[in-house]
Image (tube, rainbow, N blue to C red):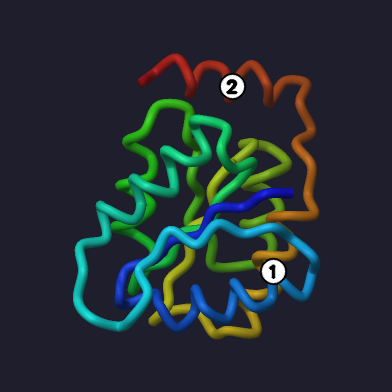
Amino acid sequence: MLLAIASDHGGYKLKEAIRKHLAERGEKVVDLGTHSEDSVDYPIYGKACAEAVASGKAERGIVVCGTGIGISIAANKVKGIRCGLCTSVEMAEMSRRHNNANILALGGRTTDEELALQIVDTFLDTEFEGGRHKRRTDMLDEMI
């Protein structure tokens, strides 16, 4: 699976841990930045990741900022994106199973690295159930 990842400075350290973890899983990763802890604006990186996923350049994405809130809002502004901010494994599972989320958002300052990697694995390994949930995700896609 080809994944796009991006973060602002508040999510940089966690993004780097995720990037390493994804490589160990054998995933292909496009790192859209940022590449340091120097202050940057999260909307730029949320948008870049979302556009990569929406255009088909990446199958799914992962975005990280300090809390995950701002960058998830930015990603969700792009048509075709369903970005879920997940703080637990259960949320990651349901974001995929019922919402067919195509981008995962995490908080670099609010989520422990070990938990974040479990959330990432669950997000990547869980399939969309379809069925009645497909009707609902189609409704979401029509909203933008």
Pick the front one: 24 or 135:
24
**In the image, which disc is placed on residue 128?**
none
Residue 101 vs residue 134: left or right? left
- Vertical position of residue 124 compared to residue 38: above or below: above
Label 2 – label 1 distance at C-alpha: 30 Å
Label 2 Cα neighbours within 10 Å, binned few <14 / some 14-19 / many ≥20: some
Residue 55 vs residue 101: left or right? left
Pick the front one: 58 or 90:
58
Q: Cβ–Cβ below 8 Å for labels 2 and 1?
A: no
Label 1 Cα neighbours within 10 Å, binned few <14 / some 14-19 / many ≥20: some
What amino acid is labelled 1 in the image? Leu
Q: x, y percentage for residue 98?
A: 68, 37
Quadrant in the picture for residue 10: bottom left
Pick the front one: 6 or 73:
6
| Mark before the other along the chain sequence, 2 or 1 | 1
Q: x, y percentage for residue 106?
A: 48, 66
Q: x, y percentage for residue 125?
A: 80, 54
Pointer 2: what residue? 136
Image quadrant holding the C terminus, namely top left
Q: Secondary structure at mark 2?
A: helix
- Vertical position of residue 128 compared to residue 16: above or below: above
**In the image, which disc is placed on residue 22?**
1
Q: Residue at x 48, y 56 (%)?
A: 85
Q: Residue at x 63, y 79 (%)?
A: 115
Q: Secondary structure at mark 1?
A: helix
What amino acid is labelled 2 in the image? Arg
Give the label, 2 or 1, closer to the camera: 1
Quadrant in the picture for residue 107: bottom left
